Amino acid sequence: YNPRLIVAGASAYPRVIDFERLRHIADQAGAKLMVDIAHIAGMVAAGLHPTPVPYADVITSTTHKTLRGPRSGFILCRRELASAVDAAVFPTMQGGPLMHTIAAKAVAFH
């Protein structure tokens, strides 16, 4: 089996996720690594959990769970994937950005 994408993340996992190990596994398989940090984003931002940024090809999260922001989300990705991610999201999944939500995200990220 040769996966093209390895997805990591959990909603109720009490242990630290080893993103470096997952990167190594993805590299061995020739796969991309996508990490969903929706439930741990606040802990990552506070430095209480390791960040997946140096290891993941794509990172997804919500802003309304542990980041205390508006009901929304975000996608981070490596530069070489940006055009493909943008094309996949807009306009099919994101019809039009809501200015009040963008402002609320800015306040939450400050």
Image: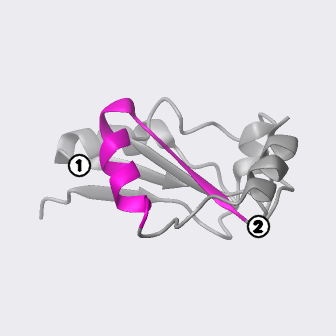
Residue at 85 percent across and 34 percent down: it is: 110
Answer with left or right where residue 25 lies relative to residue 70.
Answer: left
- Secondary structure at badge 2 equals loop
Q: How is the image coloured?
A: one colour
Residue nearer the viewer, 95 or 40: 95
Q: Amino acid at mark 1?
A: Ala
Task: Reply above or below: 9 against 103.
Answer: below
Residue 74 percent across, percent down from the top left:
60, 52
Mark carried by residue 71: 2
Residue at 59 percent across and 65 percent down: it is: 10
Residue at 37 percent across and 51 percent down: it is: 85
Residue 48 can be seen, yes or no: no
Answer with left or right where residue 101 lies relative to residue 86.
Answer: right
Q: Which residue is mark 1?
A: 31
Specify the quadrant that holds the N terminus: bottom left
What span is in magenta?
A: 72-91
- Secondary structure at badge 1 equals loop
Residue 95 can be seen, yes or no: yes
C-alpha separation, residue under disc 2 versus residue under disc 1 = 31 Å
Residue 64 percent across, percent down from the top left:
79, 62
* Of pointers 2 and 1, the one earlier in the residue sequence: 1
Q: Amino acid at mark 2?
A: Arg
